[in-house]
Amino acid sequence: MRRLSAVPGAILVALTAVACGNNAPPGSADALCSASYAPRELVDSGPLYPPLPATADGTRGEDRTTDAAAIKKVAAAACALPEPPSDLACTADMGPSYRLRFVDTQGRTTTLTAGDFGCRFVEGLGTPRVGAKPLWAALAAAGLPAPRDR
């Protein structure tokens, strides 16, 4: 009976680890919220409104910035938002939301949707976040459209 050497087995394990790499999806919140995030562009679409009968698609258009320092501040504001407590109660109103598309220097895209109604949920960071006011302030400081503080 022939025995296999341990060397081919070790090579197979090493190649598998290299091929699999990081299992985080492209553009995941992990990339956006990491200290090494290197932004290339931020596209702000909004305000977007829930579709109403006899209206267009409800979009206002897009604004963008390539100012890396400003984009990092917006990303940091989004990533610092708290997760909602389990007993959170929000109003059932509807209103505008904003879609933020972050593109990093490696071409990875992370898209967030931030509501300007109810509890101001931010989706797209893995778990929902709540209280988007600091995000609005960072967008306004970057010269991008943001809701007025109410």
Image (cartoon, rainbow, N blue to C red):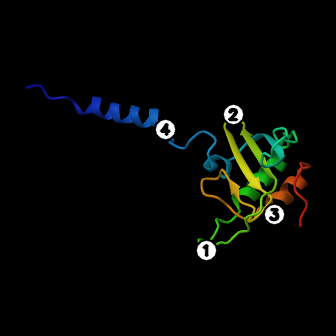
Upstream in sequence: badge 1 or badge 3: 1
The nearer-to-camera label among 2 and 4 is 2
Question: Is 100 situated above or below 1?
Answer: below
Q: Residues within 10 Å of mark 1 (few under 14, many from 20)?
A: few
The amino acid beneath tag 3 is Lys
The nearer-to-camera label among 1 and 4 is 1
Q: Which residue is mark 4?
A: 21
- The answer for how far apart the CA atoms under marks 3 and 4 are is 36 Å
The amino acid beneath tag 1 is Asp
The nearer-to-camera label among 1 and 2 is 1
Q: Which residue is mark 2?
A: 107
Upstream in sequence: badge 3 or badge 4: 4
- The answer for how far apart the CA atoms under marks 3 and 2 are is 28 Å
Q: Residues within 10 Å of mark 2 (few under 14, many from 20)?
A: few
The amino acid beneath tag 4 is Gly
Q: Which residue is mark 1?
A: 87
Please provide percent x and percent y for residue 129. Answer: 67, 61
Quick one: quadrant of the C terminus? Answer: bottom right
- The answer for how far apart the CA atoms under marks 1 and 3 are is 20 Å
Q: Which residue is mark 3?
A: 133
Please provide percent x and percent y for residue 73. Answer: 80, 54
- The answer for how far apart the CA atoms under marks 1 and 2 are is 38 Å
